[in-house]
Image (cartoon, rainbow, N blue to C red):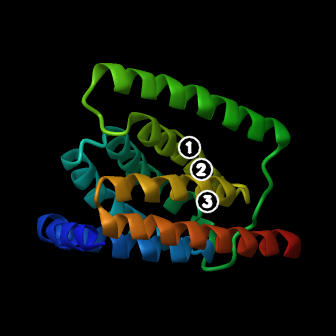
Amino acid sequence: MQEILASFFEESKAYGFLESAAVLSALIYIYLASKGKRLCFLFGLISSVIYVYLTIQLKLYFDTFINGYYIYMSFAGWFAWKNQNNREIEVLNLSKKELSLSLTLGILATLTLAFFADNYSDAALPYADAFTTVFSIIATWMVVKKYLENWLFWIIIDAVAAAMYFYKELYLTSMLFALYTIIAINGYFKWKKLLKDV
């Protein structure tokens, strides 16, 4: 425990302000997203820009890519949700065919990317990094499309990411993803209620 605390304070010196800003922005993003508020995408954008820099420093290259993708999707989501005018979003269900296709493509892409990263780069944790990246792409697409099932994907992705960042000694970010897991569970039930109310 003493080692973890010492490492936490070392990390705070190295990445303190940037990581704190990224974490705060990400928390605001996930809170607003769980409420179905369009403003979430602005805070997602801020967090993603900061995490691009941090993940390059940590050699988590797939996470760098996913944060670049989040930057793009922040703009896409902003425009896709523009007609909401602070109303609650209309939640949809993913079809069984779309779910099967998402899982199959996600697993194949994860294994392919992880294999190449493991054998041809200095990437840290290539399988966990590839998994969180690939399935985050899929889950983010589901958020923009307003599919309820996005939250089920996020629960698993966030739990894996929390463990990955803890292992890489980015403890604030690990705590963020642990909290994301809880918020994703809450988001699922909130969106499920919105789906029933339609």
Nearest the camera: 150 or 13? 13
User: What is the number of the mark on residue 135?
Assistant: 1
Distance from Cα at disc 3 to Cα at disc 2: 10 Å
Q: Quadrant of residue 20?
A: bottom left
Q: Residue drawn at (74%, 72%), measured in percent from left and top?
A: 189
Earlier in the chain: of badge 3 and badge 1, it is 1
What percent of the width, then of the height, locates residue 51?
Answer: 30, 57
What percent of the width, then of the height, locates residue 71?
Answer: 38, 53
**Residue neighbourhood size for the residue with mark 3, other residues' Cα within 10 Å, grouped as few (<14), some (14–19), many (≥20):** many
Badge 1 element = helix
Q: Quadrant of residue 54?
A: bottom left
The amino acid type, in three-letter code, at marker 3 is Ile
Q: For the view shown, which residue lies furthest in the left direction?
A: 13
Earlier in the chain: of badge 3 and badge 2, it is 2
Q: Residue drawn at (44%, 56%), measured in percent from left and top?
A: 163
**Residue neighbourhood size for the residue with mark 1, other residues' Cα within 10 Å, grouped as few (<14), some (14–19), many (≥20):** many
Q: Are marks 2 and 1 in contact (CB under 8 Å)?
A: yes
Q: Which residue is mark 3?
A: 155
Q: Which residue is mark 2?
A: 139
User: Which quarter shows the N terminus?
Assistant: bottom left
What percent of the width, then of the height, locates residue 61?
Answer: 31, 39
Q: Is residue 27 left or right of residue 58?
A: right
Distance from Cα at disc 2 to Cα at disc 1: 6 Å
Q: For the view shown, which residue lies furthest in the front direction?
A: 2
